Image (tube, rainbow, N blue to C red):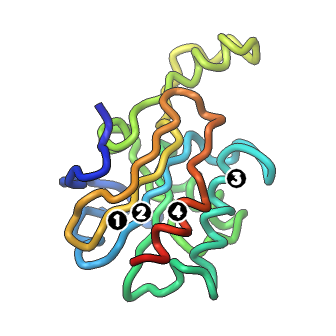
């Protein structure tokens, strides 16, 4: 069961680019947006992780509704190691960090795990990655009190995207 609207975000431990610990204390008092993505360097401008993160970045960049750092904090989250996430974030020129959850513990609780290798096998892309797990693509928006006010999970289909317009409309009301 993944986190839903009305649930508490609860405790989490993620790793930043410098291997520093990022916990629930980082988001206290702010509206937090978590964008869960299956894998760094996957997809492109028109699909997948790159499209998801660049779309969200348009809301975080100057003039976007998530730009006010006194009210909002935004993170990307994947099971990739911090080194890959930092390189991917740099490639995309993101205005928010990509955090690592190498055990997928928080990802699983938040949006669920994706049996990525099985997905690729079932869609006749590759059998070489059977057994590979990633996070589901998803998004959580958490209010300053720690309550989830938006929840999306791709539920095992890495091609499904959260609605950027829903996210934009919701944060505009904060």
- In x, y percent, where is residue 46? 80, 49
**For residue 158, above or below residue 48:** above
Of badges 4 and 1, nearer the viewer stands 4
Q: CA distance from mark 2 to mark 4?
A: 24 Å
Q: CA distance from mark 2 to mark 1?
A: 5 Å
**For residue 38, above or below residue 168:** above
Q: Secondary structure at mark 2?
A: loop
User: Does the CB distance between marks 1 and 3 fall below 8 Å?
Assistant: no
User: Does the CB distance between marks 4 and 1 fall below 8 Å?
Assistant: no
Q: CA distance from mark 3 to mark 2?
A: 19 Å
Q: Which mark is residue 20?
A: 1
Residue depicted at 26% across the width and 62% down the height: 23
Residue carrying label 2: 16
Q: Secondary structure at mark 1?
A: loop
Residue carrying label 3: 50
Left or right of residue 145, residue 96 in this image: right
Of badges 3 and 4, nearer the viewer stands 4
- In x, y percent, where is residue 2? 32, 37
Of badges 2 and 4, nearer the viewer stands 4
Residue depicted at 47% across the width and 37% down the height: 135
Q: CA distance from mark 3 to mark 4?
A: 17 Å
Residue depicted at 79% across the width and 54% down the height: 45
């Amino acid at each position: 069961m993944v986190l839903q609207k009305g649930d508490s975000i609860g405790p989490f431990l993620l790793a930043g680019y410098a291997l520093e610990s990022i916990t629930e204390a980082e988001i206290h008092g702010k509206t937090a947006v978590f964008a869960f993505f299956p894998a760094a360097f996957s997809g492109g401008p028109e699909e997948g992780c790159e499209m998801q993160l660049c779309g969200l970045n348009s809301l975080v960049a100057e003039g976007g509704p998530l730009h006010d750092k006194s009210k909002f904090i935004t993170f990307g989250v994947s099971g990739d190691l911090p080194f890959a996430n930092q390189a991917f974030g740099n490639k995309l020129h993101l205005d928010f960090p990509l955090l690592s959850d190498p055990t997928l513990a928080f990802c699983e609780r938040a949006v669920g795990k994706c049996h990525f290798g099985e997905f690729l096998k079932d869609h006749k892309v590759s059998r070489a990655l059977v057994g590979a797990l990633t996070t589901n693509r998803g998004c959580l928006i958490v209010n300053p009190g720690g309550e989830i006010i938006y929840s999306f999970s791709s539920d095992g289909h890495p091609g499904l995207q959260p609605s950027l317009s829903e996210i934009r409309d919701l944060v505009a009301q904060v």
